[in-house]
Image (cartoon, rainbow, N blue to C red):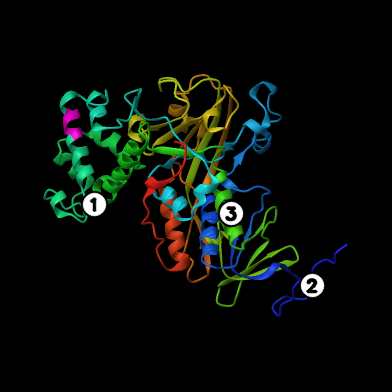
């Protein structure tokens, strides 16, 4: 039998301690959530030596995709019923989110070529809740003219607004038509086109994907760019602007982990971090796990790995994972869909998100549908918060409810070499989370990630 490789020794190792893996790295990353895996992939491609650890024995951390047994185990729900399907048929996302087809996460997947490890399919429908009804978000200016969302004259104003947005180019003043969107607010822009408040609401929440009303009194440019991304993605794939990986979101962190491993990264699952170690200046210099230690120039991780003084709570999110034996009613029997319930429609400040998936994306057994309802908590009764979403689902076979506290870092990480991601938000898409990921990358490397790539070039079966 070959002799065991001798453990490396270092001057900084205290007596009785051993080196963890190779001992010295450029970066130690804690947690295999999507953000952490993207960072480890990007850093390793740049030639950095990366050690990536996770306390769980699976990839994905809070955004993992679980089979039936692990899902029931996580929620202490006993054994899954025999009639629901076999274990291998299920890949249930703990934090379900769709990907904007031509948005920044797609660009990131293309930039790193992680698309080669994944297969995507489009989401069949995008809907908005208005006046007690589920209505399809118009996919084209022509569809807008037939939509029951608006009256006849409002439809024409909406079409003119969309044509202006489609033509608008920040670098070409002739497309601005005399409007300075770095000064004009979104509310003023809507009013310029004569659009009524109900239309403001559905455009902002269902198309620009704004989570509340704060954007209305801010310069319109950022919101207009989000609307352009939505419209561009929608025109690209027709039925909705969203795509989703076959076999669930768990494939995303695994894809970036594979990228890191190919470039020499070291992965250790089922290995908790007992202590992050700091020098006299308060800078993170490594980690301890049991009687093993590793050193690095900086550490990266999700909030759960860091001392409480390094993060602050930003609220709570309730998510309900529901098993149905039918598609969501009033959505045209579609196998997958997103429904956004603008908060003001149901007397709330924050929107409620409903997304549904099925066997067509290989996440459930045939005949079983998953619907997930999520929102930011405004009171202290989670069941009450999601009632408007659950009311749209019809008969629910099984429901799992989770309430999580969300966190963000107190500092930017530069002074203490501790770069911390923010928790995932309550929305059913990745746009806000990708902004946090790009910010995290810039804080670590000091430069922006090059996102100048055409998101049209995804080679997949849509």
The mark that comes first in sequence, 2 or 3, is: 2
The local secondary structure at tag 3 comes to helix
What residue is at 35 percent from the left and 22 percent from the top? 132
The local secondary structure at tag 2 comes to loop
What residue is at 67 percent from the left and 31 percent from the top? 87
The local secondary structure at tag 1 comes to loop
Give the crowd class for mark 1: few <14, some 14-19, many >=20 residues within 10 Å. some
Q: Magenta span covers which residues?
A: 154-159
The mark that comes first in sequence, 1 or 2, is: 2
* Residue 408 inside the magenta-drawn segment: no
Image position of 137 (left or right of 159) = right
Rounded to the nearest angstrom, the CA distance separating label 1 from label 3 is 38 Å
In the image shown, does 76 or 429 lie closer to the viewer?
A: 429
Rounded to the nearest angstrom, the CA distance separating label 1 from label 2 is 59 Å
Rounded to the nearest angstrom, the CA distance separating label 2 from label 3 is 32 Å
The mark that comes first in sequence, 1 or 3, is: 1
Q: Tell me if label 1 and label 3 are in contact, CB under 8 Å.
A: no
Which label was assigned to residue 219? Answer: 1
Q: Is residue 421 above or below residue 161?
A: below
What residue is at 77 percent from the left and 70 percent from the top? 7
* Residue 156 inside the magenta-drawn segment: yes
Q: Position of residue 44 (x, y in %)?
A: 55, 63
Please identify the quadrant where the C terminus is shown: top left
Q: Position of residue 48 (x, y in %)?
A: 56, 68
Q: Please give the residue where the numbered disc 3 appears in the rendered image.
A: 257
Which label was assigned to residue 16? Answer: 2
What residue is at 70 percent from the left and 56 percent from the top? 271
Query: Which residue reaches farthest bottom?
Result: 11
Image position of 66 (left or right of 381) = right
Q: Main secondary structure of the magenta part?
A: helix
């Amino acid at each position: 039998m070959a002799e065991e490789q001798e453990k490396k020794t270092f001057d900084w190792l205290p007596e009785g301690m051993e080196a963890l893996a190779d001992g010295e790295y450029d970066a130690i990353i804690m947690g295999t959530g999507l953000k952490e895996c993207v960072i480890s992939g990007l850093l390793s491609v740049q030639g950095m030596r990366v050690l990536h650890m996770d306390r769980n024995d699976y990839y994905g951390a809070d955004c993992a995709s679980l089979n039936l047994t692990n899902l029931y185990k996580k929620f202490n729900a006993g054994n899954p019923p025999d009639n629901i399907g076999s274990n291998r048929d299920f890949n249930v996302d703990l934090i379900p989110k769709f990907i904007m087809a031509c948005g920044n996460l797609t660009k990131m997947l293309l930039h790193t070529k992680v698309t080669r490890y994944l297969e995507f399919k489009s989401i069949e429908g995008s809907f908005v809740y208005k006046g007690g009804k589920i209505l399809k978000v118009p996919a084209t200016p022509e569809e807008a003219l037939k939509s029951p969302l608006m009256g006849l004259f409002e439809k024409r104003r909406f079409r003119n607004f969309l044509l202006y947005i489609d033509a608008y180019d920040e670098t070409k003043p002739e497309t601005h038509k005399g409007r300075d969107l770095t000064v004009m607010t979104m509310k003023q822009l809507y009013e310029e086109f004569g659009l009524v408040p109900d239309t403001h609401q559905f455009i902002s929440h269902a198309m620009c994907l704004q989570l509340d009303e704060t954007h209305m009194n801010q310069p319109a440019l950022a919101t207009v760019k989000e609307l352009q991304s939505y419209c561009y993605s929608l025109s690209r794939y027709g039925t909705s602007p969203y795509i989703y990986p076959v076999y669930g979101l768990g494939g995303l962190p695994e894809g970036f982990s594979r990228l890191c491993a190919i470039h020499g990264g070291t992965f250790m699952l089922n290995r908790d971090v007992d202590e992050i170690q700091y020098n006299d200046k308060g800078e993170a210099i490594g980690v301890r796990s049991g009687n093993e230690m590793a050193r690095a120039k900086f550490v990266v991780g999700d909030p759960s790995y860091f001392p409480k003084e390094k993060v602050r709570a930003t609220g709570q999110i309730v998510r309900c994972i529901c098993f149905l034996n039918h598609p969501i009613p009033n959505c045209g029997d579609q196998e997958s869909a997103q429904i956004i319930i603008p908060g003001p429609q149901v007397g709330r400040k924050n929107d409620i998100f409903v997304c549904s998936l099925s066997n067509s994306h290989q996440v459930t057994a045939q005949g079983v549908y998953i619907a997930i309802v999520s929102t930011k908590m405004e009171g202290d009764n989670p069941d009450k918060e999601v009632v408007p979403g659950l009311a749209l689902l019809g008969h629910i076979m099984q429901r799992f409810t989770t309430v999580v506290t969300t966190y963000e870092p107190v500092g930017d990480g530069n002074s203490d070499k501790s770069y911390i991601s923010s928790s995932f938000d309550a929305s059913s898409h990745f746009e806000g989370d990708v902004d946090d990921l790009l910010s995290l990358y810039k804080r670590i490397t000091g430069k922006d990630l090059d996102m100048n790539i055409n998101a049209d070039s995804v080679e997949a079966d849509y």
